[in-house]
Image (tube, helix red, strand yellow):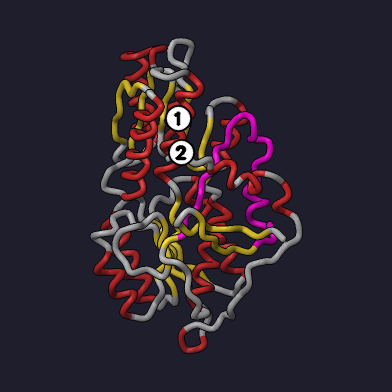
């Protein structure tokens, strides 16, 4: 199962991405009744810096293409997300970009969006649909690699604790399962695993303090599926409780934490760049072109050895790039052409 995503996405970690290349192309800005095209964008958790960076990348790229964006924040509330989509539909959007918190309960509302002839671009959402396309982070693989990495740092059969995401959210089901599978394959001993239902830093910090008391130095590794909360766990470390903490996200704070040694590693969602890729997918839909139903986005590992090569959010925002797809090993992967 193990595939080195860091190797495949290595080009995105180095400055060569800034070389002159093809840029994303606008398909025009005429929407319904000749008005400006409006993209509705539902963010599942706006307080997460990674998702905020992705939203920023989407908004800036949309403006470049001459589109307007309506952004809503569900704040980890599936009911609010459903209401937000209904409101955006009433306001007259031409396309919807959404990361569903509950892909089952929101389907009736998305059916209404599709019935209005509005393309729906999702990410990290294998269930429900049909969608124009699903930009699907390799969450399970990244979490699998995180368990492997902790075993590599501390040895097989070393002890680790794990913060899990809420199982009601598809993304976290994948990350939770991937970490468990990777731990089993690598021989990593999971001392305890607890769910952070609201994905809050305070909840993770409380778990870390409990583990400090229960396990002390026996907990050599700590996994958290979100960088925002992984940083809260890392803040609890001291001389008697100093696990290697790993997370997923790749936000600026997490990258700086890897640079300083606060985090051992993170798996990089490249949020600003992927925000731009979501606009590319919308442009393809509005132009009448087709994309594969599922496009996998690999997550490279950022650690002490390569953190100096990581693109900043500004570089991800300004780079002249073109997005595309390639078939490999029976799957479709997102590609970035830098010329």
**Outermost residue toward the front?**
329
The picture quadrant where one finds residue 304 is: top right
- Horizontal relation, residue 298 to residue 76: left or right: right
Please tell me which residue lies in front, 69 or 24: 24
Q: Nearer the viewer, residue 89 or 176?
A: 176
In this image, 7 relative to 69: left or right? right
Q: Write down the region rendered in magenta.
A: 295-321
Q: Is residue 86 left or right of residue 158?
A: left
Whether label 1 touches label 2, CB < 8 Å: yes
Which residue, as the protein is rendered here, is positioned at the far bottom? 33
Task: Describe the element under mark 2 as helix, strand or loop.
Answer: loop
Question: What residue is pinned by disc 1?
Answer: 148
Q: Is residue 312 magenta?
A: yes
Q: Position of residue 186 (x, y in %)?
A: 41, 27
Residue 85 in the image: state x and y as whole percent: 34, 67
- In the rendered view, would you say 319 is above or below 308? below
Q: Nearer the viewer, residue 45 or 276?
A: 276
List the single residue furthest toward the right. 20
**Figure label count:** 2
Q: Quadrant of the C terminus?
A: bottom right
With respect to residue 196, does 90 lie above or below?
Answer: below
How packed mark 2 is, by other alpha carbons closer than 10 Å (few <14, some 14-19, many 20 or more), is: few
Residue at x-position 33% and y-position 24%: 190
Circle 1: element type: helix
Q: Which residue is mark 2?
A: 2
Q: Does any portion of residue 204 appear in the rendered image? A: yes
**Is residue 1 part of the magenta span, yes or no?**
no
Please state if 79 lies on the left or on the right of 322 as rendered.
Answer: left
């Amino acid at each position: 199962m193990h595939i080195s995503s860091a190797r495949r996405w290595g080009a995105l970690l180095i400055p060569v991405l800034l070389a002159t290349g093809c840029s994303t192309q606008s398909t025009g800005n005429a929407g319904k009744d000749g008005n400006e095209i409006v993209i509705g964008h539902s963010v599942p958790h706006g307080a997460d810096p990674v998702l905020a960076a992705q939203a920023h990348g989407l908004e800036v790229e949309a403006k470049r293409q001459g589109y307007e964006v309506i952004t809503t924040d569900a704040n980890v509330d599936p009911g609010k997300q459903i209401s937000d989509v209904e409101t955006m539909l009433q306001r007259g959007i031409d396309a919807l970009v959404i990361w569903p918190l509950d892909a089952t309960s929101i389907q009736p509302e998305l059916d209404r969006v599709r019935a209005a002839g509005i393309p729906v671009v999702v990410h990290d959402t294998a269930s429900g649909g049909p969608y124009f396309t699903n930009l699907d982070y390799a969450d399970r693989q990244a979490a699998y690699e995180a368990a492997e990495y902790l075993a590599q740092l501390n040895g097989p059969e070393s002890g680790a604790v794990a913060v899990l995401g809420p199982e009601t959210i598809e993304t976290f089901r994948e990350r939770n399962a991937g970490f468990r599978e990777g731990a089993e394959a690598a021989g990593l001993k999971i001392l305890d695993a607890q769910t952070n239902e609201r994905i809050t830093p305070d909840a993770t910090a409380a778990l870390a303090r409990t583990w400090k008391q229960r396990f002390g130095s026996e907990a050599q590794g700590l996994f958290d599926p979100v960088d925002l909360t992984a940083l809260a766990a890392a803040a609890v470390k001291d001389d008697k409780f100093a696990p290697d903490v790993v997370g997923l996200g790749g936000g600026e704070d997490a990258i700086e934490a890897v640079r300083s040694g606060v985090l051992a590693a993170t798996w990089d969602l490249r949020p600003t760049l992927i925000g731009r890729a979501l606009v590319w997918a919308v442009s393809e839909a509005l132009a009448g072109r087709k994309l594969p139903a599922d496009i996998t986005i690999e997550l490279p590992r950022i650690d002490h050895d390569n953190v100096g090569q990581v693109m900043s959010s500004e570089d991800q925002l300004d780079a002249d790039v073109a997005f595309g797809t390639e078939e490999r090993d029976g799957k479709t992967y997102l590609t970035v052409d830098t010329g």
